[in-house]
Amino acid sequence: MKKILVVDMTHGGTVIASEFSKKTGVKVLAWDQYHTLDDVAKDSLAADGIGLVDDHFLENRSDDDLLVVAPVHSQLDVPVTMTHHQAVRLLLEDEITVPIIEVTGVKGKTSTVAILKEIYRYYNPLILSSLGVEAVEGEKTTLLLKDISITPASIIIAWKLALEAEFNPGMCIFETSLGGTGLAEVGVLTNLAEDYHIAGNSKKASQAKEQIFQSRMIACHLDSFHSNYSNKDYINRTNTFSLDGEANLTISPVKYGIMETSFTLEVINLKNISGELVNTTLPVRTFAPGPHQLENVLSAACAAFSLGTPENEISSGLEEYKGIKGRTSILESGDLRIVQEINPGINLTAIKKSVAMMDHYGDMALVLGGQYGITCEEIDENSLAAFLDELSNDTTLILTDELGKSLSNKINRVKIYIKDLDDAMDLASELKVANVLLIYRSHFASVEKR
């Protein structure tokens, strides 16, 4: 009997172990590496015939035939047979028969998925993103599950939720952390805006995200491709996109607007999944008030062209995209415009881009803050403090919550600290500026509850 050890119950291991336990001829073991399982979860694993092992199991094992299934970011002293991503492919490749797009990257994943949702709305897509699992049927969107991670195991959860809801998707669009499963017709790598370390500093994110190249076709940010993957055998399956480089998908001069941006997509020798070369131009209007939002649009459009989607469906879907509530969304009240950037993964790069975006739209107050411990990727506060010190004093800086409190002790320029986010926003709204930019590190659902 084949033995399978599934490592890390915190990041989707329970789901993967339970799925493997349904296979015949296997004995499944589980290692709760971070000791997060409660008694109910342990009992559930036991009911599936899954045995829990202790922290010394791998040190003392004598079974050389053991298959080890672990997240790509795990630190183990034994060879890993397959990553969680690869395990999900093995478990689902015979079940999902509709086209799949998988999206990974450092920034812009959720926005790219949201844009793709608009392009493929009438294909009845099943959507997995950090905003939840959604079943889309034309104009109707049903939220199947709100709070979900984007670990690869969540793809299994999303698929099972669709089956339980008797929803028959025409395609699937999955946001996945740290790479792709290989299930996708088209895998998207949005960018490597910050190539942070994982696995106890033994690996970089770019190494884990290389798993997206297991997809049949890849849409990849041009600079990310050239800096990390161009020496690999991926070039014949990769289409690149860029705002200003010589990519397969780029743009003509852009006319930015806070609510609508217009430009022309330039498609040059782009390979679609049928093997055809696409050369065309496509006028577009969409929501992209700054360059980083426009890059998200390009990543989605590159994926759509790679899949062979008709041009009219791409342009109409992009026109329908109006942003994500909280994540670069616009509120207007009288003469005041409030731009919200609420995201659990906000980092220094994203903050710089958001501030730069607002340079075009008049004077502003910047409200900045948020919470700790909501993602594995924390923020470089010293570098952020140095950036904030360089801002013009014409920009009123209001700091809030845990992150704001810590920053207030590292910033030399004039600033205001207000503990409560609502109070901070009230003050910003009273300053008689044209714009308030809220940059807040949190899940939007948490902000809604305030």
Image (cartoon, helix red, strand yellow):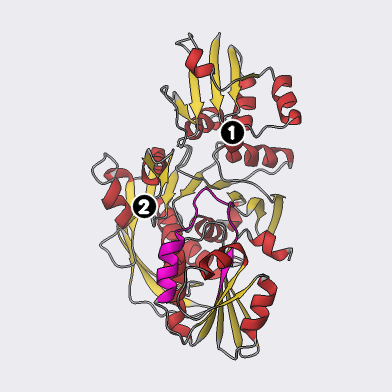
Q: Which residue is mark 2?
A: 220
Give the mark toward the camera: 2 or 1.
1
Residue 155 picture location, percent across and down: 58, 40
* Quadrant, the C terminus: bottom right
Q: Nearer the viewer, residue 70 or 396?
A: 396
Q: Is residue 295 visible?
A: no
Kind of residue sitting beneath label 1: Tyr
Q: Quadrant of residue 416?
A: bottom right
Kind of residue sitting beneath label 2: Cys
Q: Residue furthest left?
A: 231
What residue is rendered at 54% in x and 19% in y? 56
Q: For mark 1, give the secondary structure.
A: loop
Crowding near pointer 2: few (<14 within 10 Å), some, many (20+)?
A: many
Q: Quadrant of residue 75?
A: top left
What residue is rendered at 60% in x and 62% in y? 402
Q: CA distance from mark 2 to mark 1?
A: 33 Å
In the displayed structure, would residue 385 be above or below residue 305?
A: below
